Image: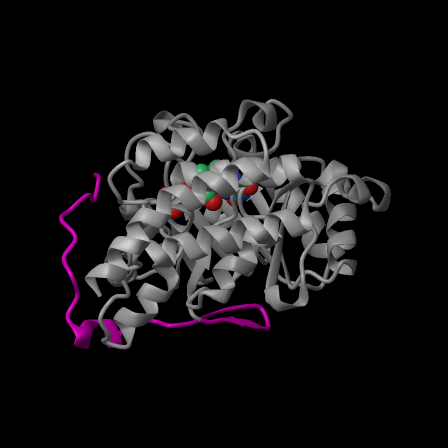
Amino acid sequence: MNDQVAMIQLEQEQIQQLPTAYRVGPITVTPNIILAPMAGVTDSVFRRMILSMGGCGLVSSEMTNAASVSPKLLQRHKLLDYLPEERPFTMQLSGNDPDLVARAAQTIQELGADILDINCGCPSPKVTGGGHGASLLRDLPKLRQVLRAVRAAVTIPVTLKFRAGWDEQHLNYLDTAQIAEEEGIAALALHPRTREQRYTGDADWSRIAAVKRHVTIPVIGSGDVTDAHAALWRLHTSGVDGVMIGRSAMANPWIFGQIAQLRRGEQLFVPAPADKYALLQRYFTMCLEEMPERLALNKLKQFISQFQIGLPGSAAFRASIHHSTSAADAWQQLEAFFASYIELAQIAA
Ligand SMILES: Cc1cc2nc3c(=O)[nH]c(=O)nc-3n(C[C@H](O)[C@H](O)[C@H](O)COP(=O)(O)O)c2cc1C
């Protein structure tokens, strides 16, 4: 049964009854609205930008292959880099060799992660082909071994992020959740699509609610939370302990703050063109300060491809950014596009 019922806006009284925090071992995650890990997106710059805007209680590294977590390889990729202001900080590992994942987990603990998350959901053939990510859903005894080995190797809390199953014929989210609880996993995050669905169809939150009823550890729901009202609606109707926001954080990075505003009974902040311009400027500046120009430009292109611009001419602007070949070129496109809207707003004011 799918639960795509019409979402209704909650009354303030109902909002006040929603949970605002949950615990992962010794760590209190508050607010209980968290940034979903997104490979290629949620690097330290993106995470710090989101955290600085308020309303986000926890962030995570991008998924990192356990085989690449050695002091030598860590110098080559920056996937586990983070700054103190990102705490509490989660690092996410993928892997299917219990000993190897356990060794990587120890390194992660030494790197100072507050929480270690195991990925059991990535649908990418490159990842599942190696038996990692969602592939573990096809071998729950192996998943159990991995979790047991990791739990024995570290003292920091271990969490699990998983999908509903490999395909509709093999939905095993309740079994997966139960194994995780039995192995001492501190919290679960379910993205309720199957591996076969990738990102198609709807995220069926009735599956998340079923997991919440099935285990006693905290359960976080992930999938299709498109705005602030939807986040609170999901908390209300599914009974979960927290909500994860992925793609909507790129489309509308203000969403976390907007959820906090709803909770305080305030009017939602609606970003004006000047706010959007300032955010893109800040993001691009941070990228340019911290990475090579080519990578920074790619990050800007990726962000703008998802960012809700909501102004006439957005599609042409996106295309022009997409075709820019240097930072200088991109700056010029940014300025040219937003200048007219900001001037108009100033005249109107
Ligand atoms: C570009 C992209 C990269 C992702 N990378 C990861 C990842 O590294 N680890 C992970 O557990 N989930 C990853 N996900 C899944 C998200 O964390 C999230 O569960 C999913 O996108 C559904 O939530 P949403 O509808 O809020 O985006 C990724 C999703 C996207 C769109």
Q: Quadrant of the N terminus?
A: top left
The x and y percentages for residue 212 are: 36, 56
Q: How many marks?
A: 0
Give the percent coordinates (x, y) of residue 259.
32, 65
Quarter of the C terminus within the rendering: bottom left
Q: Residue at x 76, y 47 (%)?
A: 104
Residue 208 falls left or right of residue 128? left
Q: Answer with the quarter of the image where residue 155 lies.
A: bottom right
Position of residue 345 in the picture relative to residue 168 (left or right): left
Residue 318, relative to residue 61: is it above or below?
above
Give the camera-side residue of 327 and 270.
327
The reply to whether residue 87 is visible in this rendering is no
Query: In terms of secondary structure, what is the magenta stretch mainly?
Result: loop
Against 64, is 220 above or below? below
Whole-percent x and y of residue 113? 68, 60
What colour scheme does the image use?
A: one colour
Image coordinates for residue 296, horizontal then vertical, percent: 60, 41
Question: Does the magenta run of residues contain 81?
Answer: no
Left or right: 298 in relation to 71: left
Q: Is residue 4 magenta?
A: yes
Task: Give the left or right position of residue 212, taking residue 42 as reference.
Answer: left
Residue at 24% across, 39% down:
312
Residue at 62%, 68% (x, y): give it. Answer: 85
Q: Tell me what residue is drawn at x 46 percent, y 49 percent.
A: 177
The span shown in magenta is: 1-30
**Residue that lies at the very extreme toward the right in this rendered image:** 72
Can residue 81 be seen in this snapshot? yes
